[in-house]
Image (cartoon, rainbow, N blue to C red):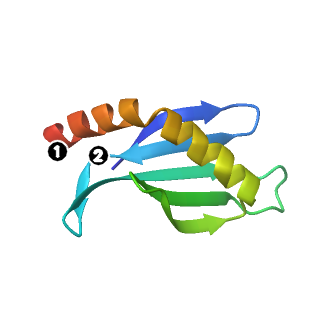
């Protein structure tokens, strides 16, 4: 399940995160960002990566500058995200 972290009304960018999961024996959190298109003919932009390493598993439509901006924001707030994700994992 994904939980809301940040929504930017100006850019229609949405960032969500999962509860803590064990993947290959390591604690990780899935981060998913999307951005609605500027017009009806564009596709939605998507980004998926995992904390703590930031390894990207999906990047569609976002520029490298966008990805850096999103990852910097997430990494700056990683402590809060980890705390929330661990709480959500306990409730699952």
Report whether 41 appears left or right of 60: right
| Residue 46 relative to residue 1: left or right | right
Q: Nearer the viewer, mark 1 or mark 2?
A: 2
Quadrant the C terminus occupies: top left
Quarter of the image holding residue 53?
bottom left
Q: To which quarter of the image does residue 24 belong?
A: bottom left
Relative height, residue 71 to residue 73 (above, below): below
State the image coordinates of residue 2 (x, y, percent, origin top left).
39, 47
What residue do we see at 62% from left, 45% from top?
A: 70
Give coordinates of residue 85: x percent, y percent: 30, 39
Q: Identify which residue is drawn at 32% across, 38% down.
A: 82
Q: Residue at x 72, y 63 (%)?
A: 61
- Which numbered disc, 1 or 2, marks the residue that appears first in the sequence? 2
Q: Are marks 1 and 2 in contact (CB under 8 Å)?
A: yes
Check disc 2 and report its element: helix, strand or loop: loop
Residue that badge 1 annotates: 92
Instruction: Using the rendered image of the protein, determine whether residue 38 is visible from the camera's viewpoint.
Output: yes
Question: Picture quarter containing residue 67?
Answer: bottom right
Residue at left 58%, top 58%? 47
Secondary-structure class at tag 1: loop
Q: CA distance from mark 1 to mark 2?
A: 9 Å
Which disc, if any, is residue 26?
none
- Where 20 falls versus 80 (above or below)? below
The residue wearing badge 2 is: 19
């Amino acid at each position: 399940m994904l939980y809301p972290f940040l929504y930017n009304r100006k850019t229609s960018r949405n960032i969500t995160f999962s509860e803590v999961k064990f993947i290959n024996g390591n604690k990780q959190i899935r981060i998913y960002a999307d951005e609605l298109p500027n017009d009806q003919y564009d596709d939605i932009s998507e980004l998926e990566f995992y904390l703590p390493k930031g390894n990207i598993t999906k990047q569609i439509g976002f520029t490298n500058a966008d990805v850096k901006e999103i990852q910097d924001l997430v990494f700056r707030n990683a402590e809060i995200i980890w705390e929330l994700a661990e709480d959500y994992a306990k409730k699952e």
